[in-house]
Image (cartoon, helix red, strand yellow):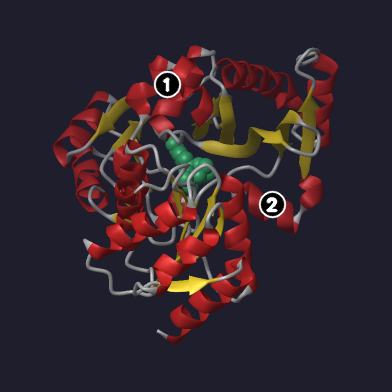
Amino acid sequence: MKIHEYQAKEVLAKYGVAVPKNAGVASTPQEVRAAVEALGGRGVIKAQVHSGGRGKAGGIKVANSPEEAEEIAEKMLGMLLKTHQVPEGLTVLKVMIEEPIQIVKEYYLGIVPDRDTQRDVLIVSAKGGMDIEAVAEEDPDAIARLPVDPLEGLSDYKLRQVCYDAKLDPAVISKAMVFLRQLYSCYVASDGSLAEINPLAVTADGRVLAADAKFQIDDSALFRHPEFAAYADVSEEDPLETEASKDEIAYVRLGGDVGIMCNGAGLTMATMDEVKRAGGEPADFLDVGGGAQADRVRKCLGIILSDPNVKGVLINIFGGITRCDEVAKGVIAATEVMDIKVPIVVRLAGTRAEEGAAILAKSHLIPAGTMQDAAAKIVALVNAA
Ligand code: GDP
Ligand code: MN
């Protein structure tokens, strides 16, 4: 689960992370004006959307008076902020208001789980303020990493080494080590799946502060963190994914035009691979789960077809305990009550596959024998559409 910058700073501050003074979040220009007044007449106004790169996209502005703050907020609130991470844009519904700081140096601190080392790895760079992915591409040597042994924890000499390797100014290394310890404690205790302070800012008056913060929480651990429930922001989530999760349907929207519905995550991923191999682009990952009864199939198809990009659907079901003839009847029953304008290819394998195929042959659905055959058929139909 992604959370907003103001929430991430709230969480990190509990672990001692120094952040700029703030006057909270606001959703109207009047509130923004009052917040800047409370800060003494000047403030930074920061769009709260689940994306990085807000600065470049116009989502971070300095106001030199409460009047200017109100004007900035009038433009920023309600705008569609198009960042390089979310090019389609996110609507700004809230902004956070902070004391303006005079930044003289920017560093990067982060933690992510790393599959190669099977450790959480600390990432440090003297090239802060910009996208770490861009730094990794342009100047990989500017990034230093420290995989953390969970039993050993953090040791001072390793922390010092990673800061030194990252070419941090020697004068701030001791302070950066404190931030890394706080960030790591917060990440572990909160079941984080990503934590970033970018930039860690050194100010003209000699302070070191987390000027920006990003934090993501492992969804599978949310059940043991009731304190984060209030942080969920459905306005930022894909409405179809939210809809699917209400019915406990595993659905991920992917942006292509071939709708995919299978049973089992493994079969779904293999089917996506086949669609790709046939030259198509999967519109989604959708696992109907076991059973594939008519009402569930209908719900799943409804979600897939609500995506306006979808030009065709591939249904690939393996009948185990559930027999293929039952699945075929379920799929037909579901499609009969729906107004479907795109082709649907169905491939059934497993128990009573032949009986299932015979039922499908009498319907308007397009049967397929193998996964490759099914993928080729749907991709040809979608690409011709
Ligand atoms: P991001 O673009 O979404 O990563 O948002 P950030 O909060 O990191 O802001 C982007 C950049 O704006 C930072 O790297 C800073 O250079 C600058 N910035 C952010 N907050 C302040 C501030 O309070 N004062 C000043 N002068 N610059 C800021
Ligand atoms: Mn940032």
Outermost residue to the left: 30
Q: Label 2 amino acid?
A: Val
Question: For the residue carrying disc 1, how many other residues have a C-alpha within 10 Å: few (<14), some (14-19), or many (20+)?
Answer: some
Q: Label 1 amino acid?
A: Glu
Q: Quadrant of residue 176?
A: top right
- SS state under label 2: helix
- Left or right of 336 on screen, residue 347: right
The tally of labels here is 2
- SS state under label 1: helix
Q: Position of residue 236 (x, y in %)?
A: 34, 44
Of residue 256 and residue 198, the one placed in the foreground of this image is: 256
26 up-or-down from 151: above or below? below
Any part of residue 205 in sight = no
Residue name at image x 67 percent, y 17 percent: 181
Q: Which mark is residue 282?
A: none
148 up-or-down from 339: above or below? above
Question: For the residue carrying disc 2, how many other residues have a C-alpha within 10 Å: few (<14), some (14-19), or many (20+)?
Answer: some
The residue at label 2 has a CB less than 8 Å from ligand 2: no
Residue name at image x 80 percent, y 15 percent: 156
Q: Which residue is mark 1?
A: 10
Q: Which residue is mark 2?
A: 135
> How much space separates mark 2 and mark 1, taking CA atoms?
28 Å
Any part of residue 166 in sight = yes
- Left or right of 58 on screen, residue 68: left
Q: Position of residue 149 (x, y in %)?
A: 80, 20
Residue name at image x 85 percent, y 17 percent: 157
Outermost residue to the bottom: 384
In the rendered structure, which disc, 2 or 1, sits on the residue that comes first in sequence?
1
- Left or right of 202 on screen, residue 382: left
Asked if marks 2 and 1 touch (Cβ < 8 Å), the reply is no
